[in-house]
Image (cartoon, rainbow, N blue to C red):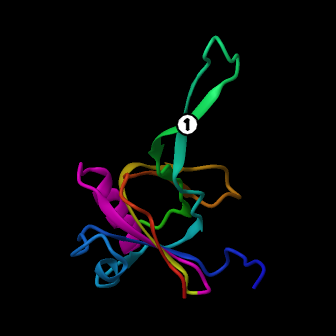
Amino acid sequence: MAHQTAAGATLGISAAPPASHTISGFDTVSFITVGEVTNVGEFGKEFALVSHQPLNTRGTKKSKGSFNNGQLNPNLALDPSDGGQQAMEVALESDDPVYFIITLKTGTVFYLVGLVMSFKPSIGNADDVITASTTIELSPDEILKKVA
């Protein structure tokens, strides 16, 4: 398959940690699907640039510094009765990390760890769906990918 659409992708959340930070450890976790997700967003490791300019060579030397796994910014249609959305709001009030699964329609899975930093409803006009935007800051733990 050369490409795929995002249609069919799901986001799940769990407050229960895996036994180990491995694919087999995460495979045993029960995730609650977050309902009405319309966009998960981008994520992944990005390194800081460390550079200096030695006077005698005039060139800029570059190295990789620290890395950041980024953040997820899922958007969703607000459903106060949805268990996954309720779990996101509970996680918002906690300082503890929570665990996420992103499953693509092909069966490829990403496992992530993060902190729910925001869950903000947005009420527009009469022809808008009430939505919520969220921010999940990802931990430096490895983002695990299991290809189906």
Residue at the spot of label 1: 63
Expressed as whole percent of the image width and height from the top left, the position of residue 29 reads 29, 80
Q: Is residue 102 magenta?
A: yes
Furthest-front residue in this view: 56
Residue drawn 62% across the image and 81% down it: 8
Magenta range is 81-106
- As drawn, 46 above or below 25: above
Q: Does the magenta stretch include residue 144?
A: no
Residue drawn 61% across the image and 86% down it: 106
Residue drawn 30% across the image and 70% down it: 21
Q: What element carries label 1?
A: strand
Query: Left or right: 120 with respect to 56?
Result: left
The answer to which quarter of the image holds residue 20 is bottom left
- As drawn, 131 above or below 47: below
Expressed as whole percent of the image width and height from the top left, the position of residue 103 reads 52, 78
Which quadrant would the C terminus be assigned to in this image? bottom right
* Residue 7 makes an appearance in the image: yes
- As drawn, 83 above or below 45: below
